[in-house]
Amino acid sequence: MKKVVILGSTGSVGVNALRVIARHRDAFKVVGLTANTNAELLAGQANSFKPRLLGIGDPSQYARVKSALKTPKRVLKGIEGLIEIASMKEADIVLVAMSGTACIRPLIAAIGAKKRIALANKEAIVSAGPIVMGMARSLGVEIIPVDSEHNSIFQCIRSENKESIKKIFLMGTGGPLKNIARNIFDRLNPSRILAHPIWKMGKKISVDSATMMNKGLEVIEASYLFGMDTKKIEVLLHPEAIIHSMVEFKDGNIMANLFYPDMRFPIFYALNYPERRVSHLPRLDFSKMRNITFDMPNHRKFPALELCYYAARRGGTYPAALNSANEEAVKLYLEGKIRFTRVVDAIKKVLKRHKNTPSPSIGDILNVDRWAKEEVKRLC
């Protein structure tokens, strides 16, 4: 039985992971759960799965967690509490499902404790990819991607020589604005912006999907996870979301990974890796498929994509500045303080003002994180 810690158990990935575990209690035991602010849901999960440790990122929610527990449990608070849970001795797997750069220190702690990582957070890799991946390699720690696209790439190349790869096709649906004219973006209700055509996600990632920043961040993430130059990573739109990524090899063969669009598939794979177990997840029915279509993204309509390629080419702390500026700009949009198109405009201005550190430390990255967020607030 594998013992699992879930960092960010109240988000969409964390909730789906617990749905998977609930169906396979003979294979998994939850030993630690954390959330940022959702005290009631965290306590409810703890009452069902009975982990040894709980963590709440927002210390002001500590009392609410404690009062909602049916049986007493040790509850840790703040970033230091999350770090302790991420590195707890009995854990075999740490599923990193927290959003944002707040997960960098807990992720580093889990790697330092030599835990297998199931990674569903792209911001930590975008901001600190060389440090995180270098540390994982030096300690022999396996990082299994959980994002559907990167999980698919991982499955396609797991037994292949990296030198044989010609190109990675990173798939995307095009998001909720694919067929909407850019000149009316700012007139759309936020509910329309958040209405992804396929996936049910949190608000932040839904906005990222609408700007296509999410796909650009995934390009940077893929380059670090798989050691590939971004010149070899191409975004391809596939609205049906049946093919989740493809890899083209030097000999012209292309491998693709297909599954019904349900996040439980990559979660189940990552938790069970390297085994393949029988699941009860929905299967594709090819007899009912009528269209499998592809399209190229419109970089002029969605300039966030080009910003991500630019930041990746510059390297150093540019990806961290990009990611943190995006976090803050999206936050301001969701609070109703800026227009939708202002999100990417603000990020572009931050990158113009950024002074790069070519080989940053974690401290440098966290400093850039703070600077970029403050700069967005000042600009907006």
Image (tube, rainbow, N blue to C red):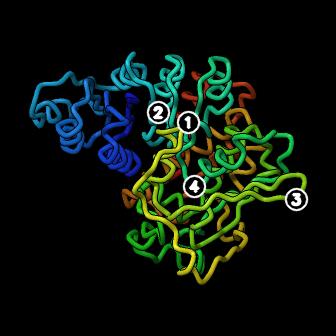
- Of the two numbered discs 2 and 3 on the same chain, state the one appearing first in sequence: 2
**What residue does disc 2 label?**
103
* Nearest to viewer (mark 4 / mark 3): 3
**Residue type, label 3:** Gly
Query: 309 or 129: which is nearer to us?
Result: 129
Instruction: Where is residue 219? Give x, y as percent.
Output: 68, 50
Question: Seen from this angle, which residue lies furthest right?
Answer: 251
* Nearest to viewer (mark 3 / mark 1): 3
How far apart are the alpha carbons under marks 2 and 3?
39 Å
The 10 Å Cα crowd at callout 3, few under 14, some 14 to 19, many 20 or more, is few
At 36% from the left and 56% from the top, the residue drawn is 335
**Residue type, label 4:** Asn
Query: 223 or 281: which is nearer to us?
Result: 281
**Residue type, label 1:** Ala
Tag 3 secondary structure: loop
Q: Is residue 378 visible?
A: no
**What residue does disc 3 label?**
252
**What residue does disc 1 label?**
124
At 44% from the left and 58% from the top, the residue drawn is 333
CB contact under 8 Å: marks 2 and 1: yes
Instruction: Where is residue 126? Give x, y as percent.
Output: 62, 40
Tag 4 secondary structure: helix
